[in-house]
Image (cartoon, rainbow, N blue to C red):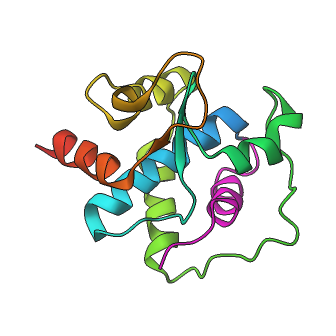
Amino acid sequence: MAVSAHQAAKTLAVLKDWTVTNLELQKLLYIAHMVHLGEHGEPLISDNFEAWDYGPVVPGLYQHLKGFGADPIGNVFHSVPSISEGSREFVSLVDTVKNTRGFTPGRLVSITHWPEGAWAEYYRPGNKGIIIPNESIKSEYDRRAA
């Protein structure tokens, strides 16, 4: 069962000891969502990603965190429910953090900006509001796994 982007972001931030920036969080969330779709056939988060200039972005989450700029985000998720630690969603987020340990922000950007990926398929420079369909994100997972 999909969780909210805010729930997933809170979990990622906790797992990263609150050292993650908005940019990194968006990239990690996209990677976790893509892998979860590929491995479980269902979305990790219920929110949509859009194809923005800086990659796949969940707009509501971006707006919630943009005040931090390029600094690590603080805990602005006090009223956001936690994800159950035994759930598939939680495990997907833990796996993403483990599998991207040591990745620079630049490396995360290069992963999400893959020319054969879903972001590249829908990205139009300077445009916001273009949703990246989950079917395309799942197809990206399939292409990467091949």
Which residue shows up at 54% across the image and 40% down it? 50
Q: Is residue 44 left or right of residue 78?
A: left
Residue 93 spot, x, y in % from top left: 51, 61
| Vertical position of residue 111 compared to residue 90: above or below | above
Q: Is residue 92 left or right of residue 125?
A: left
Which residue shows up at 58% across the image and 24% down it? 127
Which residue shows up at 70% across the image and 40% down it? 20
| Vertical position of residue 3 compared to residue 52: above or below | below
Which residue shows up at 86% across the image and 72% down it? 79
| Vertical position of residue 51 compared to residue 74: above or below | above
Considering every residue shown, the one lying at the far top of the view is: 125
Magenta residue span: 1-19
Q: Nearer the viewer, residue 66 or 108?
A: 66
Which image quadrant for residue 111? top left
Q: Is residue 61 left or right of residue 76?
A: left
Residue 98 spot, x, y in % from top left: 46, 51
Residue 143 spot, x, y in % from top left: 17, 41
